[in-house]
Image (spheres, rainbow, N blue to C red):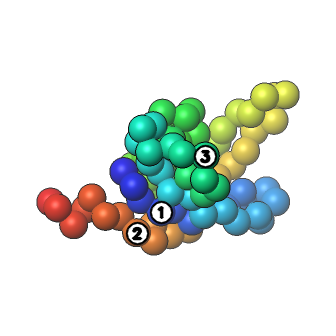
């Protein structure tokens, strides 16, 4: 949790960077994604170069590939 992840939409090439946070930490600021959001929970645990396919409203499917895990603060406490 609280990891910053860079990923891309495989079909469009568009890149994103989001921080996965606990729902209590959702404060409306951009760049945060709740771990309880459907795509947030799907991204938890993925490693670099792994992909998920995600069906969005309207029937389209997004293919997301993890490019980099830039920060993973909770891993420091293991």
Residue beneath disc 1: 4
Of mark 2 and mark 3, the one earlier in the sequence is 3
Could you tell me if residue 21 is visible in this image? Answer: yes
Could you tell me if residue 65 is visible in this image? Answer: no
* Mark 1 vs mark 3, CA separation in Å: 16 Å
Q: Under tag 2, what secondary structure?
A: strand
Residue beneath disc 2: 71
Of mark 1 and mark 2, the one earlier in the sequence is 1
Point out residue 17 in the picture as x, y percentages from the top left corner. 60, 63
Q: Residue at x 66, y 38 (%)?
A: 54
Say the numbered circle drawn on residue 63. Answer: none
Q: Is residue 36 above or below residue 76?
A: above
Point out residue 65 in the picture as x, y percentages from the top left corner. 60, 58
Q: Is residue 34 left or right of residue 28?
A: left
Q: Is there a contact, CB below 8 Å, between mark 1 and mark 2?
A: yes
Q: Is residue 44 above or below residue 23?
A: below
71 or 46: nearer the viewer: 71
Residue beneath disc 3: 28
Q: Under tag 3, what secondary structure?
A: loop
- Furthest toward the right, the residue is 58
Tell me the quarter of the image containing the C terminus.
bottom left
27 or 75: nearer the viewer: 27
Judge depth for marks 2 and 3 and give the one in front.
Answer: 3
- Furthest toward the top, the residue is 58
């Amino acid at each position: 949790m609280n990891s910053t992840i860079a990923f891309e939409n495989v079909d469009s090439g568009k890149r994103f960077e989001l921080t996965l946070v606990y729902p209590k930490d959702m404060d409306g600021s951009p760049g945060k994604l709740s771990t309880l959001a459907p795509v947030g929970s799907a991204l938890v645990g993925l490693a670099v170069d792994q992909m998920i396919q995600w069906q969005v409203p309207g029937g389209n499917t997004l293919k997301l590939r993890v490019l980099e895990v830039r920060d993973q603060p909770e891993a420091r406490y293991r």
